[in-house]
Image (cartoon, rainbow, N blue to C red):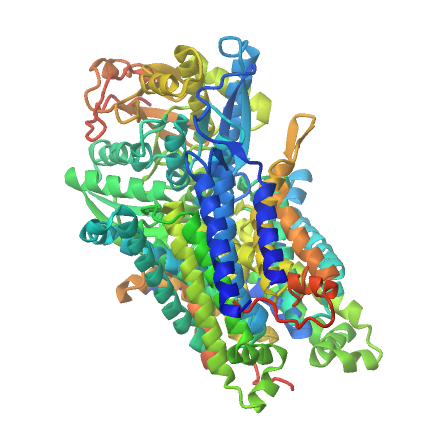
Amino acid sequence: MDTFVQQLINGLTIGSIYALIALGYTMVYGILRLINFAHGDIYMVGAYAGFMIATSLGFAANPSALGFGVTLIGSMAIAAGIGMAIERFAYRPVRKYSKMTTLITAIGMSLLIEYLFVFIFSGTPRSFPQLLPNENITLFGNATISTSQILIFVVSIALMMVLQYIIFRTKMGKAMRAVSFNITSAKLMGINTDFVIAFTFALGSALAAAGGVLTAQYNPKIEPLMGIMTGLKAFVAAVLGGIGNIPGAVLGGLLIGAAETLVVGYGSYVGIPSTYRDAVAFAILILVLLLRPAGLLGSNVQEKV
Amino acid sequence: MSSWLKSILIGAAVIVVLYVVNAMMSDTGFFGVGVDDYQARLLVFIGINIILATSLNLINGFTGQFSIGHAGFMAVGAYSSAYFSVTYGRSVEASLAGLGDLVASSVVLLIAIAIGAAVAAVAGLIVGIPSLRLKGDYLAIVTLGFAEIIRIVILNIDAVGGATGYQVPGYANFLWIGIFAVITVLVIHNIVKSDTGRALVSIREDELAAEAMGVNTTRYKVTSFVIGSSFAGVAGALFAHYNKFLSTNDFQFIKSFEIIIMIVIGGMGSMTGAILGAIIVTLLPELLRGLPDLQVGATTFRFADLRLVIFALILILTMILRPQGILGTAEIGSFFKRFRRADKPTGGMKA
Amino acid sequence: MTRAFLTLALIVSIFSSFACVQKGGNGGAADTGDTIKVGVYVDLTGQTSSFGQSTKNGIELAVEEINNAGGINGKKIELIVEDDQGRPEQAKTVVSKLINQDKVRALLGEVASTNSLAAAPVAQEAKIPMITPSSTNPKVTEVGDYISRVCFIDPFQGSVMAKFAANTLKAKTAAIFGDVNSDYSKGLTQFFEEEFTKLGGKVVAKEAYTQTDPDFKGQLTKIRNLKPDVIYIPGYYGQVGIIAKQARELDMNMPLLGGDGWDSPELWKLGGAALKNTYISNHYSAENPAPEIQNFVKAYKAKFNVEPDSLAALAYDAAKVLADAIKRAGGTDSAKLRDAINSTKNFPGVTGQITIDSSRNAVKPAVVLELDPTAGKFKFKETIAPEGSAPSAAANTNSNSNSGMTAATNANSTNSYTSANTNATK
C-alpha cells in the first residue's frame, strides 16, 4: 500500500510539471490552432533564466524564500518576454499561411532555441542551486514526500488558480476566450487580437518557466535539450485533457505523470519494461486520438467546412 | 523518336552515368579519376535522401497529409533488412555461390531491400489506418509519437544490437543506391501523374470536395502513406547496407525533421523540389563545417557548431519569406518551358 | 526530351562540383609541412555534447603542452576538431572527411562506443591509427589493428565493482539501475551481474532509465521494496547525482556503487550530501598527490575554469599516448605509428600506467574511491589490478596515500581478472 502511495506521489509530482507546461500548449492551441513546438524549449529557457538569476544574485549561497520567489518571478518574466518575441517575429508573419507552414515554423523555432542554447551554454548539464531547504517528510510506513515535491504541488495549484482567475474574471481573459471562439468576429468586436495573442504567449511561457524552475528544485540538472521530451509529454497531456480546455490540461498532466510512473513501477508485472516509459505517453496519445479525439474534458467540435 | 526508344535511351544514359560515378568511387577510380571516400559518402547520402524526400513528398506534398515520423519507417526498413542479411545473408550467398560473387551478393541485397520495403509498408499500414483519420497537426504528432515508439522498441531488442549498435554487411554501393533513387523518383512521378495521383492532389486541395466527388479519401490517404513508408524502408535498407552500422541514435526526431526540411526548402508538392532539397540538406551542413573559429579572450566560438542553428534559421526564414519553398509546386523543368517554341507540343519526359 | 537532358545536365554539374581527385597509389605517408595533423571527432552539439566538450578540452590541453614544449621532433601538432552530433552516421562521415579531406595522420575520438564502432572501420580501412579515449565496449578495438584505447573495457570495470561489493562490502543482494540508451551502462550492467552472481551474490532487480527522464523515483521505489544490500548505478554524473539524491529522499541508505562515468565536479553539486556511502571505480583520483596528476588538474582548471572529469583525463592521456607513439615511430608513417601505439608500455598517464595489450586495450589497475560529499572529494579505498599483476601492486597501497594506482602492470589477459583486493585505507 505505501509503495503504491509512494508511486502515486512520484507520478503526481511529475504530472504537476506536465500540467503547468500543458496549460501553455492548450491556451495557444485554443487561440491559434497551432502546436507550439517551441513551448517545451521555453520550459528549458525558464530553467536557465532561473539558474542565471539565482547564481548572479547570490541566492545559491543562502537558501531563502525571498531568493526562490525572485528567481521564480524573474524567470517567468524573462520567459514571457521570449515567448512574446517568438510570437511576434516567427509566428505572426506566418499566421496567414496554411497550418502546415505554421507547424513547420514552430518546429524550426524549437530547433533554433535548442541548438542556440547548446552553442551558448554547451551541452554540459548544470546543477541548479537549492533555493529552499529540502527536507524529507515521512507520511506513513515507507511513503515519504520531500519539501521540493510539496513546493511543486503548492506553486502549481496557486499558478493554476491565478490563471483561472485571469481567464474567467478579467477583461483580458474575456478577450482571450472571445479570440479562441472566433478570431475574426473578435476582431470585428474591436478586440486587439494581436495583443491578445501576444498576451496568451506571455502567459503560457511564464507558466512553462515556472515549471522549469520548480523541476530544477526537484531534479536540479538543467541542460539545453531537457525540454524536448518533457514538452512532448506535456502536449500529450493537453490532448488527453481536451486541447483548448484549461482544467483538461491539468487533469491530463496529472494522468500522464501518474500513468508513466505506474508503468515504471508496475509495468513489468504485465510485460511492459520500465524503459518503455516514454512510449507510454505516446501510446496514450494515440489511443485518445482514436477513441475520443476531443479529449477527456473537451467538447466534440465538428470541423468547419 | 518513339517514346519507348526515348525511355530506353534515357535509362541507358542514367545507368552509364551512375556506373561511371560508381567506378570513380573505387580504389582505382575511373581511368584514374575518382572521388574520395568522403565525397563518395556524400553522393550516396544524396541518393538515400532523395528516396526519403520524394517518398515523404508523396505523403506531405501531394496528398497534403502531415507526417513527421518518416525516420521511424526508415528505421523499420533498415533494421528488418539488416536482420535478414546478418542472419541469412551468408547462407543465401553460399547457396548461390555458383552464380558468382557479384550475383550472389546482389540477390541478398535485393531480398533485403524487398524485406525492408515490405516490413516498412506493413508498419505504414498499421500506423496509417488509425492515424489517417486524424487531420493536420494531430496526424503530425501521432506520426512523431509512432516514430519514437518504433525507436524505443528497437532499442530494447538486443538481437539487433540494442544501444551498442548493429553491424551489417556492406552489400550496397553507389550504383545500387543511385538506381533505387531513380526508380523511386520514376515510380512516384508516375503515381502522381496517374489517376491515383490526381485523387491524392484532390485530397490535398480540398478533402471534403474530393470526398463529395466520390474519391475514397481514406483509402487513398492510406495508400499514399503505405507507399511512402515502403520507400522509406527501401532507403533504410540501402542506408543499413551502405553504412554497415545501425544505431537507434541515427533515427531520432532530428532525422525526421531533416527529411521535412528537405521537402519544405525544395517546395512541397514538387518532385524536383524534393530532389533539390535533399541535395541542399545533405551538402549544406558539410559546407558549413568550414566556418572559422572566433577567439574572444579565453573562449573560442566555433561557428561550425552553429550548423544546426543556421539550419533552423533557414527553415524559419523560408516559411516567413517563401512558405511554398524554393520551387513551390512547380518543377525545375517547367522554368525552361518558356524558352520553347509555342508550336512544339509540351510532353516532356514520359518515362 | 529537353527536360530530361536538362535534368541530366543538372546531375552532372552536381558531380562536377566535387573536386575530382587523382586515384591510384594512395599517396603514402605524406609528411609534408611542419605540422602533424590529428583529427578529433566528438559530439559537440548533440545529447552527449557534455562528454564531447570534456574530451575536446582534455585533448586541447595535452596538445598545447606538447606544442609549447617544442612539438614532436620539431613538428607541432595541428588539431582538427569535428562535431558528429552524437550520431553514428555523422561520426562515420566526419571521420571520412578528416581522413580524406584534411589528411589527418591519426584520429582521437568518440566517447560513446556506438559512435566509435561506426567510425572505426573507416580508420581501419584507410590505415589511420585511431585511439579512443573513452569507448569502453570490447568490440571497438576488435575492428582492427589500427584501433586502440586508453580506458578500461566494460568487463573489467563491471567485475571490479562486483568484487568490491561482494568481498569488501559483503553484499549478498544487489540491484542494478542503468541507462538504457548507453552501451557503456549496458556493458557494465552485464559484467557486474555475471561477476556478482559468480561470487555468490544475487541481483534482485534490474531497472533502467533514460537520460531525459524527469525523475527516477518510480524505479527507485520499486527497487526499495526488494531491499538490496547495494545498488549498482553504471551511468553518467548528470543522472546519478539526482538518482542518489532521490534514493536518499526515499530513505534508501544502502551503499550506491558506480563507475568512472560518475567522475565530474558537477556530481557534487547535483548529488550533495546524498553521495555519502557511495563508491565508484575509476582510473585515477584527482586528489592523488602524484605530480603528473596535480599538474594536469591545475593546468586544466587554469585553461578551462572547471575541474576535469574522467573523460577529460582520459582524452588528455589519449593525446599524450599518441604523441609519445609518434615520437617513438619517428614520424607518422601509418604502419610504424600503429606499431608504436600498440607497443605502448607503462606510459605514465594521468589515469594510471598505460600499457596497450595484444587486443589493443589499455591494461591498468582500477581504483575504488569512496565519495566524501562534505569535502567534495574522492577518498581512495583500494586498488584492483587486472589478473596477473605483480604482487607488488598490493605493496604499493599500504600507505595512506593513493599511490596504489601507480602500480605497475604487466598483464596481457583481458578476459579474466582477479582482485588484488588490497588494504582499504581511510
Residue C289 visible in the picture: no
- The N terminus of chain C sits in image quarter: bottom right
Q: Outermost residue toward the right?
A: A190
Q: Position of residue A26 (x, y in %)?
A: 61, 70
Q: Nearer the viewer, residue B172 or B340?
A: B340
Q: Which residue is drawn at 68% across and 72% down?
A: A32
Position above or below: C167 against C74: below
Q: Nearer the viewer, residue A56 or A290?
A: A290
Q: How many marks?
A: 0
Position above or below: A160 against C53: below
Q: Nearer the viewer, residue C308 or B148?
A: B148
Question: Quadrant location of residue C191?
Answer: top left
Position above or below: C32 against B207: above
Question: Quadrant location of residue A117?
Answer: top right
Q: Position of residue A105 (x, y in %)?
A: 66, 61
Position above or below: C294 against A40: above
Q: Which residue is drawn at 57% across and 66% down?
A: B349
Q: Position of residue B271 (x, y in %)?
A: 58, 64
Specify whether B196 is left or right of B96. right
Q: Residue at x 64, y 47 (%)?
A: B309
Residue C102 visible in the picture: yes
Q: Outermost residue toward the front?
A: B1
- The C terminus of chain C sits in image quarter: top left
Q: Where is residue A154 in the image (x, y as percent from the top left)?
A: 57, 61
Specify whether B244 is left or right of A301. left
Q: Residue at x 53, y 51 (%)?
A: A226
Specify whether C104 is left or right of B330. left
